[in-house]
Image (cartoon, rainbow, N blue to C red):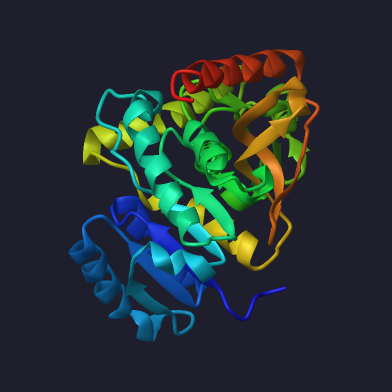
Amino acid sequence: MRKTSRKVVIVGTGFVGTSIAYAMINQGIANELVLIDVNQEKAEGEALDLLDGMAWGEENVAVWSGDYSECSDADLVVITAGINQKPGQTRLDLVKTNAGIMKDIVRQIMGAGFNGILVVASNPVDILTCIAWKESGLPSSRVIGTGTTLDTTRFRKEIALKLSVDPRSVHGYILGEHGDSEVAAWSHTTVGGKPIMEFVEKDHRIDEKDLDIIADKVKNAAYEIIDRKKATYYGIGMSTARIVKAVLNNEQAVLPVSAYLSGQYGVKDIFTGVPSIVDEKGVREVIELSITPEEEQMFKQSVNELRNVLNTVR
């Protein structure tokens, strides 16, 4: 059921934060939107710019810049702040600087009396989601990372292009790290309800080599974009808006967010990208897919890489 009052605070008004705000306003997801940034004038300017298009939006949204005191009655806070990934740099390379930034931000959010849902969109997202959870003291279900939501949309897009179908008719997930060790769950990928492996076995439009090419394209998509325009933001903006919408509207939607694992997939005490049921209370449930032994091995390797990095910044 849709909430009548829906206040969202976005921390960080760089390309990602403003793309999330723009997507949310166009879709009428929130009716109160607050922008916070260390550069107060930048936040003010972005709020004014967004307000200029309000007459064409889905609904009238109050948009303004503010400080952390605005978090006290917010339903949801989205954190996008941090240094950006540079050409040739992996998401995990960002960890030390952005871990410190994340801790400081979360302290200020919680210091304002925040008691809602935290959504982390900063990179490396799986690591920073874990840090945000530890720092916040909130239940793990109420701290959500964007996880492999963006990777999954890229995955569906590439399959759709190959088979000339609408990407909304493709279903499947990228699991694990939002990064170089991510895993394409081909065993649970379907097109119009038909398993992708049946297309491989019976349809010459796609074969095993194509699957490898698609998985590689998805994994390297960010590098391709960063090499050309120095940053990625539209895709993650729309992906994050989708998560926010699922929470505020209590959708109980299944999304591949970075969620806390407590034994699912044989993994404990870490956040990573897995399909999860998202509702007004955050992650209601992690869905444990029956993946193949090979996929399971790759997933655990991905988790181990995350854990090794996390152990350097705890």
At horizontal 35% and vertical 51% (from top left) the residue drawn is 16
Q: Is residue 263 above or below residue 140?
A: above
- Which image quarter is the N terminus in? bottom right
- Nearer to me, 107 or 171: 107
On the image, the x and y values in percent for residue 4 come to: 62, 81
At horizontal 70% and vertical 44% (from top left) the residue drawn is 276
- Nearer to me, 299 or 94: 94
How many circles with numbers are drawn on the protein? 0
At horizontal 50% and vertical 67% (from top left) the residue drawn is 72
- Nearer to me, 3 or 211: 3
Answer yes or no: is residue 250 visible.
Answer: yes
Q: Is residue 77 left or right of residue 222?
A: right
Q: Quadrant of residue 3?
A: bottom right
On the image, the x and y values in percent for residue 86 come to: 25, 31
Q: Is residue 20 above or below residue 256?
A: below
Q: Quadrant of residue 37?
A: bottom left
Q: Is residue 300 left or right of residue 95?
A: right
On the image, the x and y values in percent for residue 117 come to: 59, 56
Q: Is residue 97 above or below residue 49?
A: above
